[in-house]
Amino acid sequence: MKIEDFKEIIYNDEYLEIAVKEYLDFKKTEYYKENYKKEILRILNEYIQNTRITPENVENIIEEFKKNNPQGRSFAYEVSIDNLLKLSRENPVLISKLLNNLYDETIQLDERIKVFDEEVKQLIGKSLGTPLYAYLLAGFDYKKYPLYKDEIFREFLNYYSIPEK
């Protein structure tokens, strides 16, 4: 679906505008407890943007993601990060290649994720999961790859009868 088509669907009425205003107002209250995420992602963005990913440092990079994944309020499942960390120790050449590919914006996003996921499945027999891929991408550029709560996004798509996954 093109962004123009999406805009046409959701801008048919003012509900989205109202929802966005309410959300932005809510973010200014004491009840909004998510500001820490933006700060963590900003730090990771700076780190990743200033680090050349190589087989020699890929383990350190994954450890940085692990260190910045707060327990109890995590971006990705701890077991997924641990599995990736283990893979980076056992296969640093492959994991550095996969991370570089994941961050290569000349390749379609779905293809980058697919390649990463398929290679990992060949090694450990399972996927590391969407939350980890989302965290790795947001850690690269949180403005371009924002995190969202899947359940809420699905409800949004259903509400507007948008048949996208």
Image (cartoon, rainbow, N blue to C red):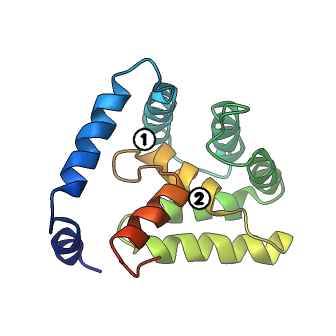
Pointers 2 and 1 in contact (C-beta within 8 Å):
no
Q: Position of residue 113 (x, y in %)?
A: 55, 70
Between 99 and 78, the one lying in front of the other is: 78
Between 48 and 3, the one lying in front of the other is: 3
Q: Work out whether 130 lies above or below 110.
A: above
Q: Within 10 Å of the Cα at label 2, are there few (<14), some (14-19), or many (20+) other Cα atoms?
A: some
Residue occupied by mark 2: 133
Q: Work out whether 158 lies above or below 83.
A: below
Examine the image and state in which quarter residue 67 appears: top right
Q: Is residue 104 visible?
A: no
Q: Is residue 26 left or right of residue 91?
A: left
Between 10 and 103, the one lying in front of the other is: 10
> What residue is drawn where x is 41% and y is 44%?
142
Q: Within 10 Å of the Cα at label 1, are there few (<14), some (14-19), or many (20+) other Cα atoms?
A: few
Q: Position of residue 28 (x, y in %)?
A: 33, 23
State how far apart marks 2 and 1 are (Cα): 17 Å
Q: Work out whether 149 lies above or below 25.
A: below
Question: Please, what secondary structure does the residue beneath circle 1 have?
Answer: helix
Q: Is residue 73 visible?
A: yes
> What residue is drawn where x is 49% and y is 56%?
152
Examine the image and state in which quarter residue 14 appears: bottom left
Amino acid type for the residue under numbered disc 1: Gln
Residue occupied by mark 1: 49
Q: Work out whether 60 lies above or below 145.
A: above
Amino acid type for the residue under numbered disc 2: Tyr
